[in-house]
Image: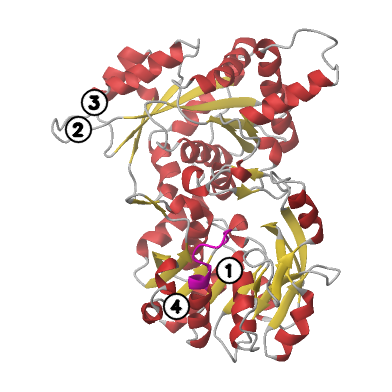
Amino acid sequence: MSMKNSKFIFVIGGVMSGVGKGIAAASIGRILQGKGLSVTAIKIDPYLNVDAGTMNPVEHGEVFVTEDGDETDQDLGNYERFLDVNIHRDNYMTTGRVYQTVINRERNLEYGGKCVEAVPHITEEIINRIKRATKKAKADVTLIEIGGTVGEYQNTLFLESARLMHLKSPEDVLFVLVTFLPIPSKIGEMKTKPTQMAAKALNSYGIQSDFILCRASVPVDAPRKQKIATFCNVHKEDIISAPDVESVYDIPVNFEKEGLGDKILTKFGMKTGPKDLVEWRKFIAKTKKIKKKVKVGIVGKYFETGDFILPDSYISVIESIKYGATYNNAKAEIDWINSDIYEGDKKKLKELSNYDCLIVPGGFGSRGVEGKIMAIGYARENKIPYLGLCYGMQLAAIEFVRNVCGKKDAHTEEIDPETKNPVIHIMPDQAEKLAKKQYGNTMRLGAYPCKLKKNSMSAELYGKSKIPERHRHRYEFNNKYRDLVEKNGLVIAGTSPDNKLVEIIELPKDVHPFFVGVQFHPEFKSRPLNPHPLFVGLIKAAVEKN
């Protein structure tokens, strides 16, 4: 389909944030893919941050890194996992990013001395970004998720841009409102008024919903659908029930039960197609039949906020574990382990023997580091399958140098800049950037090639000699310690093509069933129908241990 005929679907939230706009957008995209269309997805964040890289993961969730090195919202991860395609930096937009571009353009006199205003200049930039991402992806349909909710003034210009696109080409633009229908426990009745108010708020921007996706703990019944249709000016058949489900991967199938895909194509004046989610349905069916369980412990620190646990900080890791488990005909039971608890009581390490495998994911800072190192040592000594991701690889190297090579003061310069044994040190270009306080979007980011050592466990898992993986780090393994660790049995299983950067460390199979640390983030490339080989290998070892 040419750019002239490309279609656009805006997904907008109502009532409250966190109702699942990203998953809804990804699910719609998967359905349309199944009907033979090329689909891409865009996330708009209303923040003044230029990207997600400087946001606290406890507050904002995981920072998802794209193949071309952008630090983005976690919903781009949802898009990649559901659509099984790479999403690029053009598909991520923030208020800060848009304003920065327009201001730079104004400073360069590219507006010819005109007064630069929010309308039309900001809205033009937003629309241009949407169309550029669509063109780059050669997409028949582009889904655009606007973060937050319709009532937030931060979203005004994004909604105005959407209205202008619809005004210019109404046959090419649809609006999907995702709302929440509460069932107050003392009332016991599903209430539609919040949805009505959200639809009314959207109308105030000059936008009429084409579909309303009704999130609720249970399916929305016919009387509620009729009421929403009447007061929101939407056809009853376009009120789509979106109840809580056991797995987010059930959502595309649930939507198709109500014929959402064909309804969208009909509104676009496009030929409807068959319900073609064959492989997706097979994946879902497989997950529901599995009885075998594997217990996975994730040792980290980005978990707690008050009385609540926030697994979104590691959502890609969680999903990758699930895919690896499903591939091995197992269901993962994941526990969050706060590494702080081991620093005051070594005896508590024994609880780790209850797990079939352990993961130390990426992270930054000193809190809980010694506890993580202790947990890694326990996994190594007790032959518990272990996978270290980025920081988890660096700390595994430190643990090995301390406790196998005998250098007890080994550390990372990130935590102890004065350490006499800097097993992990800062990359030279990163030291220069930090000295200048250049923090935003300056890490080693995006996909880089990795050369695998022949006959290593990693090469066996990948089935290749060279692979691309995504990075997000400032520190690296210090090559001065390569000879030392290799003499003591640690395998340098992956390096940069020029052999200058250590990318993968592992222990031989005859020493440990699975002990692998990687400098990169394999979780960003794992998908339901294409699980990442490292997670497949980890869970395989865990199942065999079990």
**For residue 272: magenta?**
no
Instruction: Spot the residue most to the left.
Output: 186
Q: Amino acid at mark 3?
A: Lys
Mark 2 vs 3: CB contact within 8 A: yes
| Relative image position of residue 344 (x, y in whole percent) | 40, 73
Q: Earlier in the sequence, mark 1 or mark 4?
A: 1
Instruction: Spot the residue most to the front.
Output: 418
Q: Please tell me which residue lies in front, 314 or 488.
A: 488
Q: Secondary structure at mark 3?
A: loop
Q: Earlier in the sequence, mark 3 or mark 1?
A: 3
Q: Please tell me which residue lies in front, 223 or 432.
A: 432
Q: Which residues are magenta?
A: 362-372
Q: Is residue 316 left or right of residue 496?
A: left
Distance of mark 3 from mark 1, alpha carbons? Answer: 46 Å
Q: Which residue is mark 2?
A: 184
Q: Which residue is mark 3?
A: 191
- Quadrant occupied by the N terminus: top right
Q: Secondary structure at mark 4?
A: helix
Q: Residue at x 43, y 53 (%)?
A: 311
Q: Residue at x 74, y 31 (%)?
A: 135
Distance of mark 1 from mark 2, alpha carbons? Answer: 43 Å
Q: Earlier in the sequence, mark 4 or mark 2?
A: 2
Relative to 509, say whether 443 is above or below.
above
| Relative image position of residue 47 (x, y in whole percent) | 57, 31
Quadrant hosting residue 72: top right
Q: Amino acid at mark 2?
A: Pro
Q: Which residue is mark 4?
A: 543
Instruction: Spot the residue most to the top.
Output: 114
Q: Report whether residue 267 is seen.
A: no
Number of the front mark, 1 or 2: 1
